[in-house]
């Protein structure tokens, strides 16, 4: 009787071990989904933003994260000086505050036409 009980218990534990491994498959699939559809595109966008900020040159028209529009008059390592407004006031901003380079967009639109 005891040997039959042990045989049944060993057979049932072997089956549940495989069940535990199968329960990790959905978790792995979710992680793969997050990597390819969320993390990878986000890293690509961050790389494009970093390249855009590093390529800012004197004379480019930019828009900051705060909505200020100006023309770059001086570029330093981690900040730029922009000229904005009718009175040509100058503002020094950090490069990370640049949201968009308008000059490059307009030039690429002219090339397409």
Image: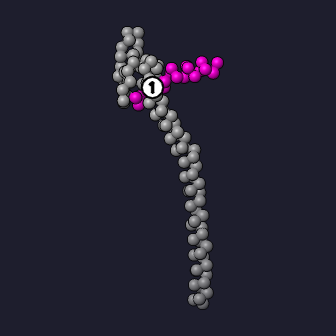
Residue 72 lies, with reference to residue 41, above or below; the image says above
Q: Position of residue 104 (x, y in %)?
A: 52, 23
Residue 102 falls inside the magenta stretch: yes
Residue linked to disc 1: 56
Name the outermost residue toward the right: 113
Left or right: where does residue 110 sit relative to residue 94?
Answer: right
The foreground one among 78 and 26 is 78
Give the extent of the magenta segment.
Answer: 95-113
The residue at the point 36 percent across, 30 percent down is 78
The quarter of the picture where residue 26 lies is bottom right
Residue at (59%, 75%) from the top-left corner? 14
Describe the element under mark 1 as helix, strand or loop.
loop
Q: Position of residue 48 (x, y in %)?
A: 51, 34
| Numbered circles on residues, count | 1
Residue 47 spot, x, y in % from top left = 49, 37
Q: Is residue 69 visible?
A: no
């Amino acid at each position: 009787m005891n040997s039959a009980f042990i045989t049944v218990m060993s057979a049932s534990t072997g089956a549940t071990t495989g069940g535990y491994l199968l329960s990790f498959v959905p978790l792995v699939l979710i992680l793969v989904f997050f990597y390819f559809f969320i993390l990878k595109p986000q890293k690509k966008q961050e790389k494009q933003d970093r390249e855009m900020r590093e390529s800012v040159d004197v004379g480019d028209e930019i828009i900051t994260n705060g909505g200020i529009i100006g023309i770059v008059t001086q570029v330093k390592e981690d900040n730029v000086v922009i000229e904005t407004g009718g009175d040509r006031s100058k503002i020094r901003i950090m490069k990370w505050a640049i949201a968009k380079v308008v000059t490059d967009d307009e030039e690429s639109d002219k090339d397409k036409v």
